[in-house]
């Protein structure tokens, strides 16, 4: 017993010193979707520099609130803020990493990548207009597949989510009906289906429910061995969800067209482009009240852009193309300044 | 003479000692009273604080929707049109299902344990029920989603749909498709969750029935059923209602387990197997990502409504108890 209490005391002492050493840690909050890769980068970065990251994955909405209240050095959001809101708070915004959203199904005899869907069909399924798997529309896209006549069980997110935002944004883009009846947001009023919490919730529900269809981040589809589908993209080509097709969508995008690089990567042009690619953004003050902390944060992001690509790919994320990184870093040195008006990030 | 003087002296001495002791008692009593009073008042202050916070937070929603918030069915974050009806409906329906199943089963267990069960088995079952009460609600949720819902979807729901297919009204209540999760599943999980609460309380109160009453009833030839119905249950009804209300309170407010298995859809369907939502599940699901004042405020307004529902249920229980007692007093 006595030994135990010594051990506990020693442990506490160690923990305490560690906490004090972490006083200089970076602090951020926001989106849950990029949390695994931010954590992995932070881990590697800490080994190299001794500076850790305290990232609270409380959701994009929470991240935006926290940065607006200045309780963190950076916020993270899956939904880019519009230009006027960035200006209102004096925030700079840049994309950090990307991922793909894939439709997943649970159909007997259908393997991953065998079924093909297009945006309009998905919109109709999620609006309850297509209710059976052997509907003509689905048959036309899949002339060779053996489709059952069972009912389609739609599974969507029950919590507010950047994934839902990107998914519904894409459906609004391809279907006028969807745009006028449902619209796009981090949460919408779903006409049909069951709601599940988080990517993992949707993944589990689809895995458990025969005849179901849902949408998840690509990584979750792989980890849960779900049957993802191929998609018909804007160019009318059938594409499979792969790192290449996600990157093709990012490469085809015109990043400078929106304030704060707020380009939503849904339905991008290009033969190879995956239609439901999604970015995730970082929010920071242009004139931070603590320039030293912001400078450390930018150093971390620069390091991640430079050294983090392989780690991102290991976790099925898509790194930002180099051309975009260059534009982002130019923006850093031009826009993010300390109180004296000096840029706090120096490009090297 | 001498003796009398000594006695007198002793008396005075005792008097002083007594006064001192009495004073000590009085101070002790006063301190005790103050401490317990503070504890009681703290509860009131906390309750008032919660109400004020809920009312204040939900003001924007009341301003925007007024009384219509109770009756509107839409829950649309895109157009910011929010109505509480589906969540209220889901909360009441799932709790009703839970009570419908949970109460008779709990009473059955309690009766069996106190009256019929052999001593050795009594302890085993008793411990098992207490363990059920100790399981965190998230575990019920995970079990419900991974084990119960898939089994329910394949083995029970198709059976229910087929059985009632040709019976009017019932075929509406049990209409497919079988998702596995939904209002009925949530109600069933809740029934399991309230079971230990109602059982342990009713068991305790059944034990308070004086044996002489029961023995007398058996003595004039009552069957077990008659003893339960005419002696034990009338004697303990206040306690039973208390246990049921405790269970109902848990069912109304349960969040995590329900969120997992209810399907989280802001809709009112005719079928009780359809996905739905409850007030607490909606708040748990959406609060973190609720962007915009009206959205957040509507969720807080939902919280206030749940508070009101609980209050009404408790008040109703009180009323019922009072009525029973008055009737019994006649």
Image (cartoon, coloured by chain):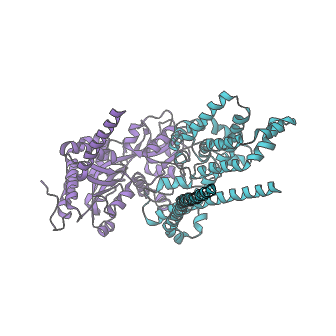
Q: Quadrant of residue A284?
A: bottom left
**Depth check, front residue: A256 or A73:** A73
Q: Position of residue A338 (x, y in %)?
A: 18, 65
Q: Image point 60% across, 64% down: which residue?
A: B70
Query: Chain B appears what colour?
Result: cyan
Q: Which chain is purple?
A: A
Whether residue A239 is visible, yes or no, is: no
**Depth check, front residue: B209 or B68:** B209
The residue most toward the right is: B220
The residue most toward the left is: A348
Q: Position of residue B64 (x, y in %)?
A: 52, 71
Q: Quadrant of residue B23?
A: bottom right
Image quadrant in which the C terminus of chain B is located: bottom right
Q: Image point 70% across, 47% down: which residue?
A: B240
The residue most toward the front is: B1
Q: Is B87 displayed left or right of A294 in the figure?
A: right
Image quadrant in which the N terminus of chain B is located: bottom right
């Amino acid at each position: 017993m006595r030994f135990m209490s010594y051990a506990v005391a020693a442990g506490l002492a160690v923990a305490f010193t560690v906490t004090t050493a972490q006083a200089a840690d970076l602090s951020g909050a926001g989106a849950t979707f990029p949390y695994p890769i931010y954590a992995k980068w932070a881990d590697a970065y800490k080994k190299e520099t001794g500076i850790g990251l305290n990232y609270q994955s409380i959701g994009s909405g929470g991240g935006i609130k926290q940065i607006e209240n200045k309780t963190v050095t950076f916020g993270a959001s899956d939904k880019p803020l519009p230009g006027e809101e960035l200006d209102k708070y004096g925030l700079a915004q840049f994309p950090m990493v990307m991922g793909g959203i894939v439709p997943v199904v649970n159909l007997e005899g259908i393997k991953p990548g065998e079924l093909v869907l297009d945006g309009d069909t998905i919109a109709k399924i999620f609006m309850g207009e297509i209710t059976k798997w052997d509907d003509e529309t689905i048959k036309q896209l899949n002339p060779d597949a053996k489709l059952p006549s069972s009912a389609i069980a739609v599974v969507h997110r029950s919590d507010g989510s950047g994934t839902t935002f990107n998914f519904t944004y894409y459906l609004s883009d391809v279907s006028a009906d969807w745009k006028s009846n449902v619209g796009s947001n981090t949460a919408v009023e779903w006409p049909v289906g069951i709601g599940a919490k988080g990517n993992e919730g949707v993944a589990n529900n689809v895995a458990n429910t025969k005849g179901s269809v849902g949408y998840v981040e690509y990584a979750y589809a792989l980890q849960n061995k779900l049957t993802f589908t191929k998609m018909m993209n804007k160019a009318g080509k059938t594409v499979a969800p792969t790192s290449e097709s996600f990157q093709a969508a990012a490469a085809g995008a015109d990043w400078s067209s929106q304030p704060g690089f707020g380009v939503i990567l849904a339905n991008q042009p290009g033969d190879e482009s995956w239609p439901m690619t999604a970015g995730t953004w970082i929010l920071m003050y242009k004139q931070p009240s603590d320039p030293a902390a912001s400078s450390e944060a930018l150093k971390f992001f620069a390091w991640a852009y430079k050294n983090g690509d392989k780690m991102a790919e290991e976790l099925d994320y898509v790194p930002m193309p180099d051309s975009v990184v260059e534009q982002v870093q130019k923006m850093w040195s031009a826009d993010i300044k300390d109180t004296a008006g000096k840029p706090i990030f120096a490009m090297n | 003479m001498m003796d009398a003087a000594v006695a007198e002296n002793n008396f005075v001495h005792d008097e002083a000692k007594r006064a001192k002791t009495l004073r000590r008692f009085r101070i002790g009593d006063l301190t005790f009273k103050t401490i317990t009073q503070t504890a009681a008042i703290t509860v009131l202050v906390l309750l008032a604080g919660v109400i004020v916070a809920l009312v204040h937070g939900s003001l924007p929603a009341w301003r925007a929707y007024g009384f219509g918030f109770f009756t509107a069915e839409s829950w649309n974050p895109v157009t910011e049109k929010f109505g509480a009806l589906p969540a209220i409906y889901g909360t009441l329906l799932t709790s009703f299902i839970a009570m419908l199943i949970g109460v008779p089963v709990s009473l059955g267990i309690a009766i069996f344990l106190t009256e019929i069960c052999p001593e050795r088995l009594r302890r085993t079952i008793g411990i098992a029920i207490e363990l059920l009460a100790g399981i965190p609600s998230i575990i019920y949720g995970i079990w419900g989603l991974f084990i119960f819902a898939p089994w329910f979807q394949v083995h029970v729901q198709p059976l229910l749909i087929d059985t009632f297919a040709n019976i009017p009204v019932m075929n509406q209540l049990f209409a497919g498709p079988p998702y596995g999760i939904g209002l009925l599943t949530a109600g069933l999980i809740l029934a399991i969750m309230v079971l230990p609460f109602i059982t342990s309380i009713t068991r305790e109160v059944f034990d308070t029935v004086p044996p002489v009453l029961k023995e007398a009833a058996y003595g004039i030839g009552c069957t077990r059923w008659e003893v339960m119905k005419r002696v034990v249950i009338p004697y303990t009804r206040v306690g039973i209602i208390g246990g049921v209300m405790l269970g109902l309170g848990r069912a109304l407010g349960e969040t995590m387990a329900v969120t997992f298995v209810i399907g989280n859809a802001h809709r009112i369907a005719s079928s009780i197997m359809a996905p739905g939502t409850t007030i607490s599940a909606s708040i748990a699901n959406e609060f973190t990502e609720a962007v915009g004042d009206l959205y957040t405020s509507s969720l807080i307004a939902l919280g206030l409504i749940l508070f009101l529902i609980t209050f009404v249920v408790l008040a109703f229980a009180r009323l019922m108890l009072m009525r029973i007692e008055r009737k019994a007093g006649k």
